[in-house]
Amino acid sequence: MKRLLNAAFAATTGISVWAASVAHALPEQGGVGMVPAGSALAEEVQFFHNGVLLPIITVISLFVLALLIWVVLRYNRKANPEARKFSHNTMIEVLWTGIPIIILLVISLPSFEVLFKDGITPDGKQVVSRGDGQTVDFVFPNDFPESRMVSRAGHLQVILDDGSSRTVLKHKRDYTVDGWGERNLVVSLDNPAPSGTSVIIRGGRSTQNVSGCPMAKRYFDGCEKEVVLAPTMTLKVNGYQWNWQYSYPDFGDFDFFSNMLPEDQTTPELYRFEVDNRVVVPVGETIRVTITANDVIHSWALPNFTLKIDAVPGRINETWFRPEREGIYYGQCSEICGVRHSFMPIAVEVVSRPEFEAWVDSQRALAGLEPMFDTDKVKLAQAADADAAAE
Ligand SMILES: [Cu+2]
């Protein structure tokens, strides 16, 4: 019962309770709610389910149950021996056609919103300038295609970064913008940016709610929005009977297969989730995923990122995700693809940028390639991490 209450609590309060998720984002044994959201977009999708669909479905189910009970009690043979005979009631027919149409419209709007966000790879761009204590005007090149141009305040984010903390500035209170819809936008700060700070201007139509926005805020005030930047890398996924092949075209000519670990090489909890070679991606960056298959149709599905995309032979599908927190996330092939279909799990490890670079170089070394990154810097960062962990 306690577990059920916890799950109900989790389902209704949504995403915020998941922030404390462990490194292995495994589904909970016997759990009821959704798996922890690993991206801000997944939080939006989960809010759509927990905050929009679930209440509507609950009300409809209770209403239909009440009608059934009423009919059973009021119109059984004993209570109502003489059945009335009629075939039409115009008012009722108008209502039971009209109300469902309104409900479907209400559901469709937020559903299209998340569908579009899921389906369109972000193209946001950022320009970083140095503050010098005098300059107030900063230029943002609005060189997007016509239909994707920055044309209103919601498409723009201005952030001051002094090296240790970031302040998000507010349109009209802290800055004004000239040239909406033109090739160059001029952002004029009310106060000059102090010297030593960075002025970060992000623009683009790919916006989403910031991660961790509480449910009540989503309903009433609306969440703070952020511009999602264009992908920093592409992950190529290729489905095989019965394993996955991954490659990283931005980081050189290497690829690897990812196979499920046999039962005796892993723990009971991780069996059928864990693989020998995980996908490794950097945290906080937009990752483009292109996916195809080598033999039959597979499907690359990662519930934590609300991703599910078919891997079709002879065709390339594209999707994206931006992991918000470090950790290990698991998924499964979700298109029945043969006898070992249920034995081709997906494991994605989200790590910091330095760790990612070190991993890339280790993969390049395996393929006989020179390192691509400054490994000394990487080692320093890892040592600092280890120190921090030891303290
Ligand atoms: Cu498959």
Image (tube, rainbow, N blue to C red):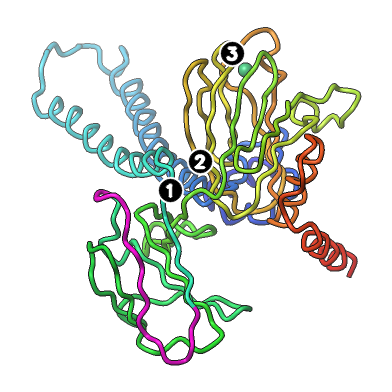
**SS of the residue under disc 1:** loop
Which residue is tagged 1? Answer: 122
**SS of the residue under disc 3:** loop
Query: What residue range appears in magenta?
Result: 130-147
Q: Residues within 10 Å of mark 2 (few under 14, many from 20)?
A: many
In the image, the residue with mark 3 has its CB under 8 Å from the nearest atom of ligand 1: yes
Which residue is tagged 3? Answer: 336
Question: In the image, 10: left or right of 365?
Answer: left
Q: Earlier in the sequence, mark 3 or mark 1?
A: 1
Image point (13%, 11%), residue name: 85
Instruction: Kindly report the distance in space between the C-alpha atoms of the residues bearing marks 1 and 2.
Output: 8 Å
Please identify the residue farthest to the bottom as the structure is shown.
134
Q: Position of residue 92 (x, y in %)?
A: 15, 27
Q: Three-letter amino acid code at disc 3?
A: Ile
What label does residue 23 carry, if any?
Answer: none
Instruction: Look at the image and say whether residue 144 sits in the magenta stretch.
Output: yes
Please identify the residue farthest to the top as the structure is shown.
339
- Quarter of the view holding residue 369: top right
